[in-house]
Image (cartoon, grey):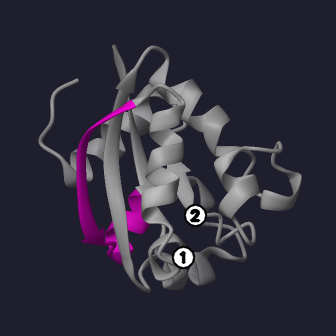
């Protein structure tokens, strides 16, 4: 079974929709095997979104991502990484496929409720920040 890392962003918790989003994740057939509530630090953001550091919006993203609590979680299932990413939908909610998490709950490209690992390398890096959890 493959595993993937997921993160419910501060907008999700501020709106009180975390249970609905986690239910949507599990309805895809993925099993949540670890979960905790945390507050991201700048260092966490720099690691998770390292590919965005040069972007004009990066400081806004750091400020948003560290503005409130988040929920980090590990899901398990066949093709967990691609299944979670497909179920999340495109980062811009207005362009996400109908029925995906971001289409249903996201409000903007930044406040799009959820993050998930892009590949196995990202999963290992992101998991290591918050969990002492096996492959």
Q: Position of residue 69 (x, y in %)?
A: 35, 77
Query: For the magenta stretch, what is the residue range?
Result: 31-48
Which quarter of the figure has residue 3?
Answer: top left
Q: Residue 11 carries which label?
A: 1
Vertical order, 91 against 133 (above or below): below
| Local crowd size for mark 2, using a 10 Å CA cut-off: few (<14), some (14–19), many (≥20) | many
User: What is the C-alpha distance between the residues marked 1 and 2?
Assistant: 6 Å
Q: Residue 111 carries which label?
A: none
Residue 45 colored in magenta in the image: yes
Residue 9 colored in magenta in the image: no
- The answer, for residue 8, to whether it is visible in the render is no
Q: Residue 113 carries which label?
A: 2
Which quarter of the figure has residue 109?
Answer: bottom right
Q: Is 122 left, or right, of 33 in this rendering?
A: right
Of 61 and 33, which appears nearest the observer? 33
Mark 1, secondary structure of its residue: helix
| Local crowd size for mark 1, using a 10 Å CA cut-off: few (<14), some (14–19), many (≥20) | many
At x 43%, y 66%, the residue is: 45
At x 54%, y 76%, the residue is: 11
Q: Is 13 left, or right, of 76 in this rendering?
A: right
Q: Where is residue 12 in the image (x, y as percent from the top left)?
A: 51, 70
At x 40%, y 20%, the residue is: 77
């Amino acid at each position: 079974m493959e595993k993937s890392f997921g993160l419910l962003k501060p907008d999700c918790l501020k709106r009180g929709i975390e249970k609905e989003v986690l239910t949507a994740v599990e309805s895809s057939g993925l099993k949540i095997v670890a979960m905790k509530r945390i507050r991201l630090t700048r260092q966490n953001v720099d690691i998770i979104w390292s590919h965005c550091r040069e972007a004009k919006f990066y400081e806004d993203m750091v400020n948003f991502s560290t503005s409130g609590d988040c929920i980090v979680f590990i899901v398990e299932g066949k093709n967990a990484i691609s299944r979670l990413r497909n179920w999340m939908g495109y980062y811009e909610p207005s362009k996400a496929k109908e029925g995906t998490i971001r289409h249903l709950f996201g409000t903007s490209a930044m406040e799009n409720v959820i993050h998930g690992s892009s590949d196995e390398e990202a999963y290992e890096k992101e998991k290591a920040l918050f969990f002492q959890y096996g492959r």
